[in-house]
């Protein structure tokens, strides 16, 4: 499932969007400083990098498409900011022959998998709270079974066909469940941010 920038923006309240932009610009600035070691005399600010990134995202430039594997919009935005920093022309002596940085390896999975969701939640120590959040959503039928069972599928590295067989659904339905899982992850993170503002 591909998603437009506007469809993601609509999920945030205005103050949450402003905070997201501020944090993303700061991330872009720090990434530029770390990668370029302040040797780039153009010294673009994080806000400028974010602006370029958002424009490229809106235009659908190559490499700026949202992937289900990005899981959360913030991480998608950070990935795109990294891409922008690494593709901007450099203005220092060491880059006279080649003014473009090599691209970073993009190891984002093409689709959200149960393994990726499980690893994401475990890294943040939020698996149990997320499972409680899923139960509160009152999902119905096989989607509920998937929502509570995805950690087991992830731990056992189940393929789509295995999950489909166990739930007695088609592989295409599992893909829809994965998209719903990503939406639930986003909602969970948004709710957590709202209840613990910085």
Image (cartoon, rainbow, N blue to C red):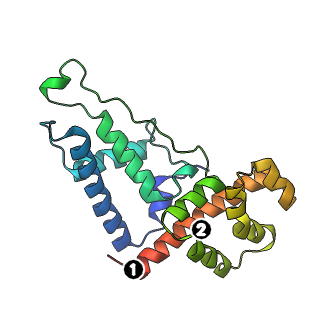
Question: Is 70 on the left-hand or right-hand side of 19?
Answer: right
Q: Which residue lies furthest to the top in this view?
A: 97
Identity of the residue drawn at 46% across and 58% down: 73
Question: Is 67 on the left-hand or right-hand side of 15?
Answer: right
> Image height check: is 44 above or below 113?
above
Q: For the C terminus, which image quadrant?
A: bottom left
Residue toward you, 66 or 33: 33
| Dot 1 or dot 2, earlier in sequence | 2
Asked if disc 1 and disc 2 are in contact, CB closer than 8 Å, the reply is: no
Total numbered labels? 2
Question: Is 120 on the left-hand or right-hand side of 39?
Answer: right
Identity of the residue drawn at 29% across and 55% down: 27
Identity of the residue drawn at 72% across and 75% down: 139
Residue 47 lies, in percent from the top left, at 23, 53
- SS label for mark 2: helix
Residue 24 lies, in percent from the top left, at 32, 57
Separation of marks 1 and 2 at Cα, in angstroms: 18 Å
Residue 175 lies, in percent from the top left, at 71, 53
Q: Residues within 10 Å of mark 1 (few under 14, many from 20)?
A: few
- Residue at which label 2 appears: 184
Residue 23 lies, in percent from the top left, at 30, 62
For residue 85, the mark is: none
- Residue at which label 1 appears: 196
Q: Residues within 10 Å of mark 2 (few under 14, many from 20)?
A: some
């Amino acid at each position: 499932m591909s998603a437009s920038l506007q469809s993601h923006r609509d999920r945030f309240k205005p103050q949450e969007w402003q905070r997201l932009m501020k944090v993303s610009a700061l991330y872009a600035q720090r990434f530029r400083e770390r990668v370029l070691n302040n040797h780039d005399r153009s010294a673009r600010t994080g806000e400028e990098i974010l602006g370029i990134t958002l424009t490229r995202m809106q235009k659908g430039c190559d490499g700026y498409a949202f992937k289900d594997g990005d899981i959360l919009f913030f991480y998608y935005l950070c990935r795109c900011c990294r891409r922008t920093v690494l593709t901007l022309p450099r203005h220092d002596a060491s880059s006279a022959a080649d003014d473009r940085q090599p691209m970073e390896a993009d190891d984002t999975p093409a689709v959200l998998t149960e393994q990726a969701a499980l690893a994401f939640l475990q890294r943040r120590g939020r698996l149990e709270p997320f499972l409680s959040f899923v139960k509160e959503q009152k999902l119905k039928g096989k989607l509920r079974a998937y929502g509570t069972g995805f950690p087991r599928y992830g731990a056992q590295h189940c393929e789509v066909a295995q999950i489909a067989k166990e739930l007695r659904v088609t592989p295409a339905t599992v893909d829809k469940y994965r998209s719903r899982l990503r939406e639930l992850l986003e909602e969970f993170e948004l709710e957590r941010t709202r209840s613990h503002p910085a």
